Image (tube, grey):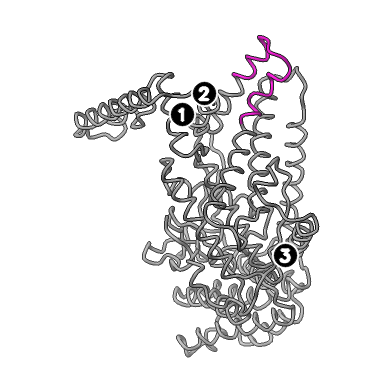
Amino acid sequence: MGDDRHQAGEPGGKTYAESDSRSDEPIDAEVIGEPGPEDADGARVWRDRLRDRTRGFFGKKTRERMADRERVHQIDVDRAEDESEGLDQREQLLKLRAETRLAGEKYMASLRDSKLLVPGFNDAERTRDLGVMHHVYMQMMMQSCLKPLSRGVNANSIIQAVGMVMTMRMLAPDFKKEMDSYLQPLKDKIQERIDTRTRGMVASAESGIAHRQRIFHDVPSDARRGRLVGSTDPRDHLTTKWRKRFDAMRHRERGHREMFTPDSAAMTEVALMENAFWKMREPGADIGLIRDSYWAMRKRLHEQMSEDGLERQEVVQRARRIIGERMEYEPELCTMFNGVAHGRIVKAPAHEERIAGSDRVRTVWSGEFDDQLGRRLPEDAMFTLRRPMDADAHQIQLAETMKTSLLDAMGRGDQESYGGNMLGYLVGFAAQKQGLDTSGLPDMLQHRLDQSEVMIASMDIDGLPPEDQQRVYSNAYVDAMEAVNEKYPDLEAELKRTLGENWQQTLQAAVDDPGAFFEEQRRKPRPRPMGPSAEQRAGPQDEAGSEDYQPA
């Protein structure tokens, strides 16, 4: 997740066409400045073809997740389009969830397809157009809540609308911050004296919070001190009337820009990365200018997040959840980020969590990522955009990943792990190219084959032809083995201990017939895990190198 501005191996001399894809969002074309139909359609077709080709590098499990996701998406579409009046509370909740998810997807798609990062836009234009798209997204959220009123204003429709609003607040607590600016009539003008009094009310609330914090500063329990102090947001201490006036005042001070929530800020950051990733790979793109535009837009987004009182770490955590969830059924995202694209950063396994107020547990994933050895990455580590890389740069990155796994196993004296690493990388390229089923294999071998998939996909999406992919992968493997041999000169003896006296024949047989090798591995008895591995017990000082990610 390292700073892509220092990423080695950018293909030299590439310049890219200023093409774009049109979005289905209801956005004023004059505002966004969309290209002609031919340019927009051509860019979308090109991107979809490259995306589909990249997905072909991933195996059966990924394809099954993609199919499951498509079924869920269609269910969401059907629920969102269901305008039946007899929906019960559960059906209304499911409908609202579906509409919320679809609105988020359309918002991210509008950013991904926009021209925000192409050369020729200045910062003011980018800020304006981003604001337009964010405004459309927030309107879609509000319209989902108020849709029952479109069937007529009566007791039942009002109750449904109020229920939708309250449900949205529970589904997305930060949505509450957006509500009052919509409910406050835009034609109402708050006079300067009312603004002054509003600021006085907020200052009074802040003073009260500070006073309670001083009084209860020495209370030993954090939880009890929090209950005594109460909310530290002055807005929560205002009456509804003054809260509306305060929100309206802040809305005007932002230049009538909609306030970001942690969720919408996270979606925006991820979508901007997607936009830049695809734009840099369009035929003829000027990679440097697109990168500079991306960093300028990202900087402005972070400034707006700060203006809106958002904590950077909270946005990072939500962005990581978005990325991790989408990686399951949009595997091309794995090629987009430094570290992830070459197998050094992986999604952490889900964990069990007790449901509050009960003895039941559920399996959840909350945005955690590990390095390739199973060690947890810092919670505030944010992914960084990967620029197009040439063959030499890919070879360096692949060799580093392979070397790290092999040296770790050797350092721990784990012969089984070393053998699994070496064989997994050795047959990984052939297994992927032959489309072999890798399910049911030992975990170590499976992890390395998964790494090989994303390694090869990352080379392909950067435009390396198949023969170059094979050469880079083979050279990287040789480089990694030489690095191990340099540190452990008696490597041949270790290979004999790990694979037997005929270790060379074992390696050759695995390369010649990886399918038969996989069947043999499936039949092998597997030891039951006795607790955390030595890798997972590694201390914080052994975490993945920070060049692969960026702290919040």
Give the left or right position of residue 86, taking residue 538 as reference. Answer: right
Q: Principal SS element in the magenta part?
A: helix
* Crowd band around label 2 with a 10 angstrom C-alpha radius: few (<14), some (14–19), many (20+): few
Residue type highlighted by circle 2: Gln
The residue at the point 62 percent across, 33 percent down is: 139
Q: Earlier in the sequence, mark 3 or mark 2?
A: 3
Give the left or right position of residue 192, taking residue 203 as reference. Answer: right
Labels 1 & 2 near each other (Cβ < 8 A): yes
Query: What is the magenta range?
Result: 142-162
Q: Give the alpha-carbon distance from disc 3 to disc 2, as whole Å.
A: 47 Å
Q: Which residue is mark 2?
A: 184
Which type of secondary structure does the marked residue at label 3 adopt?
helix
Q: Earlier in the sequence, mark 1 or mark 2?
A: 2
Say above or below: 43 vs 240: below
In magenta stretch: residue 153: yes
The residue at the point 54 percent across, 33 percent down is: 172
Q: Which residue is mark 3?
A: 54
Which type of secondary structure does the marked residue at label 1 adopt?
helix
Residue type highlighted by circle 3: Thr
- Give the quadrant of residue 348: bottom right
Q: Which residue is mark 1?
A: 248
Q: Position of residue 356 (x, y in %)?
A: 48, 31
Quarter containing the C terminus: bottom left
Say above or below: 211 vs 345: above
